[in-house]
Image (tube, rainbow, N blue to C red):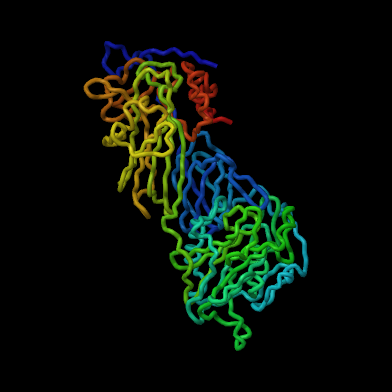
Amino acid sequence: MVIVVGISSCVDSDKDLYQEAPGVEINTSNFSTIQKVQVEIDYSNSESRVPFSIYDGNPLIEGENTTILKENVQALDGAWTDEQGKFTATVELPAYVSNVYIVSTSPFARQAIPGKIVNGVLKVSDTDEQFTTRASYRESTRFDRNRFNNLGWNTNLGSFDDRSGVIDYAYKGNDPKLTLSKSEMNELRTTVSKVLNTLGSCPEEYRTQADLYVEEDETAVVLTALRGWTCWNSSLGYYYYRYDQAPASLKDVKVYAVFPNTQMTWNNGSLQASPQGIKEGTAVQLKYFDDPEYPKGKNFPKGYYIGFILACNAWNTYFTGFNSYTLTEGFYASSTKGFSTKVNSGIDVRTAMFKDKNSNIAIAFEDFMDDQNFTDVVFSLKANPEITNVPPVDEDLNTTIEKTGVYAFEDEWPKAGDYDMNDVLVQYTYQKVFNIFNEILSESFTFKTLYNKSTVFTNGLGFILSNEGNAQSIEYFIRKENEKDFTVASGADKFTRESNAIILTDNVKTNPNAEYKVTFKYGDKNSNKKQETSIDAFIYRPSKEGNRLEVHCPMKKPTSKVDTSLFGQYEDCSKPNEGIYYVSNQENIYPFAFYLSNANANDIAELKNFDKNEKKSISEIYPKFIDWAKYGTNADWYKKK
């Protein structure tokens, strides 16, 4: 439906600028598609820093013992909590968003929590009740009293319950060199969350086929359960061998049981794994048993390697909830090269090892299912003297968030145009890289122009920055149509920096469909910047006396080079002295420009179909635009369902 509106000039040509025509009421709507939301996230159960992202709806797909992100789903925003697992800040989200999902990739956090924005506040907690109550979980297990014994592992460390696998030989010592203090546990969990992503892939540099090397005599070793997220009730063992007597296969080593049942907690909303064999924080001291003078075991001598093995679903009470359980028997994940079972993927490396800044070691396993996140079972290890042949976690292992949107301009301002909003169309991508303290290390602003051959005027493109911060360096790039990579913008393509603005090009037609990128770098490891830089893109043309005609989104202040004589002319009703810019009279429900938050290429497929929709008003292309412009309803009018 096309709505025809009467448009009258806000001033007479014979009257002073900014003087309203009698009876004309100004439409001061900013046509914003953004809302400011007070976000309060509580992952206090995790007792560490937790990464999280905010999504418009549930972005996850539940599989067999795996969860994956839906394709082409982008987070609206993201951050890290503080060390208590809490986050509070004002966040800009698309105005159409109400129901969201908070998703964390940390092995220690609840993966997805639904939330709702109420009166500008989004408040969620990992203690909030889930949709499926615990009583409704279905358990699916079988019991075979000899299943674990069939592994042939030694049980020298002690005894355990033959149904649950709960051990009676947990380490009760309090040696600070062997146990994790609360602060150490917090730090190690945070480090694990930096490296391991439950929805992603473990970095190659931390996957290992090397066992732990004991460098000194009388080395005490304690293994502590950190986290597990797998349906399989697997068994964990260790073995050791002299540096000059490397085993050729599992048959060449004695395996000692550490945790017969590593199940900690797992459910997928309907199924639940049971029984629980260990709790987070349960510790066991590993011992060397090959000295006849110490039949109960002792600390490790120097010159030995310690290896680990996870036997998938090998416990007596084993999980049968998925049909693939029949394939788990005889499946091993080992730290020693060549000892792991290969499946269709051919993956042989099934352990990851790394250490935090306190030199505490994390050991993670990838079990039967090959999602490669290595979060199925995670332990920590402390040794006295320390074991050192484990890579430290790179401090530069940071988090990246991208946000997208679209700027659309009507370039006949201050006159009324056809309001097809496609004279200059720009896809915008904001990217920030930040550390676990939410300190922004870099920001990138990318503008991809979409060429419209019907555009008559020669329009330039630039953007104004607010809350910019003190960048250590600024980089300017361009990627022209059909080019694979960005190159430094130089020569005729060089950008121009003004006081609070950057001019990308003086003619968007010069390089049709080009991408312009500006990157601000604030620091390699830390910075003082936590607030995102906000921008306002605009188009412009030369005007008189060295000034320029600029078109901005409604209520956005132009640059100091704007030709102020154009304000209040024709259909423009700006009042610069009152901070009112780029607005029309109340009868005109069309803006001269707008920004569509979280819009993507699919959302603007019709808008950028220039041949089909040239000269059609935005309300004809997007019928729901009218109710949004008039009444603020249908805020998702531009989103493709």
Q: Residue 262: image x %, image y %?
A: 65, 65
Report the residue at 52% width, 34% height from top: 96
Q: Quadrant of residue 540?
A: top left
In percent of the image, x 31 and y 23: which residue is there? 541
Question: Relative to 41, does residue 277 appear above or below in the rendering?
Answer: below
Comparing 101 with 450, the one in front is 450
Quadrant in which the N terminus is drawn:
top right
307, 179: nearer the viewer: 307
Pick the front one: 234 or 185: 234
Would you say 93 lies left or right of 99 here?
A: left
Q: Position of residue 212 (x, y in %)?
A: 53, 70
The quadrant in which the C terminus is found is: top right
Mark yes or no: residue 280 visible. no
* Vertical comparison of 268 with 33: above or below: below
Question: How many marks can you see?
Answer: 0
Q: Is residue 165 above or below residue 200?
A: below
